[in-house]
Amino acid sequence: MSKVLGEAGRYVSQQSIKKYQKQFIAIFLITCVFAFGVGCLVGARPKGLFSYALLVLLLITFILAHKKLDRDVASLERERLQFRKGAVGEAVVAHVLDNFPDDYYVINDITTDFGNIDHVVVGPSGAYIIDTKNWKGVVEADGSGELLLNGRPTSKPEVKNLIRRIMSIKSKIEVLSPLKDPFIRGLLVFPSAHVKATWGSTGHVHCLTDEQLYDYIVENIRGKKLTAKEVDAFSQSFLALARMDKDFA
């Protein structure tokens, strides 16, 4: 089995919890403000039309605020569900990576300036940065280096964003690693989708399913094979970078 460092899905799990906390805080605050306002009016024993008008205004304000809160909570819940789905996808890929040979290192959840990296794999065949997408449906290239999901453009430029994360982490690894100009392959992995994006249609980032991971990384060594010493040095550089995040386990 591979040498696994870090907790898979930590980032998306944390984000899901934060979304839930935001929902709770928003509901709690608006309820407290309304209760305080009503309490002040009732405690003051309002008399006259003006006092009752204030109470009606407070009720209307609360109803409008509650409607907006419902929309915000629904939006937060959709985001939270997306993070939870992402955690499931990362768990599937992590299980595959766990069963790589023992001369491979797997480092989960590394934070970069351009977002989180789900998995890093380092072994005799090289270094790989993996971004897991738990999408449903058909994934294909759009002809311009980006992706289509079920024939439609994605909400974000996934290939471009992964390349930015790779370049960000590579500049730091070059400082930490004794290897000169280390080559790092970017992989977009889809555990729940049918992948029709052929290699090369998305530039230096390749798209594949979780079932293709083992053959792609372990069985199909391309170019110069890394020595055990190089693998260890390379993986320790990634690990040193990961440990800059205080939450890295």
Image (spheres, helix red, strand yellow):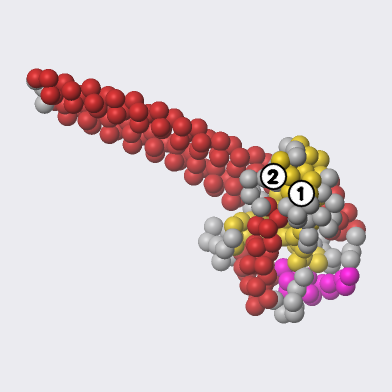
What number is the disc on residue 199?
Answer: none
Quick one: quadrant of the C terminus?
A: bottom right
Answer with mark 1 or mark 2, whichever residue precedes in sequence: 1
Q: Amino acid at mark 2?
A: Pro
What number is the disc on residue 153?
Answer: 2
Tag 1 near tag 2, CB within 8 Å = yes
Counting other residues with Cα less than 10 Å from the Cα at mark 1, is it few (<14), some (14-19), or many (20 or more)?
some
Question: What kind of element bears circle 1?
Answer: loop
Q: Amino acid at mark 1?
A: Asp
Q: Do we see residue 209 in this rendering? A: no
**Image vertical order of residue 238 relative to residue 187, above or below:** below
Horizontal and vertical percent for residue 110?
62, 60
Segment tinted magenta in the rendering = 223-235
Distance of mark 1 from mark 2, alpha carbons?
8 Å
Q: Nearer the viewer, residue 45 or 242?
A: 45
> Which residue is labeled 1 in the image?
142
Q: Residue at x 9, y 19 (%)?
A: 48
Horizontal and vertical percent for residue 107?
69, 59
Q: Residue at x 24, y 27 (%)?
A: 58
Q: Quadrant of residue 192?
A: top right
Q: Nearer the viewer, residue 56 or 22?
A: 56
The secondary structure making up most of the magenta span is helix
Quick one: quadrant of the N terminus?
A: bottom right
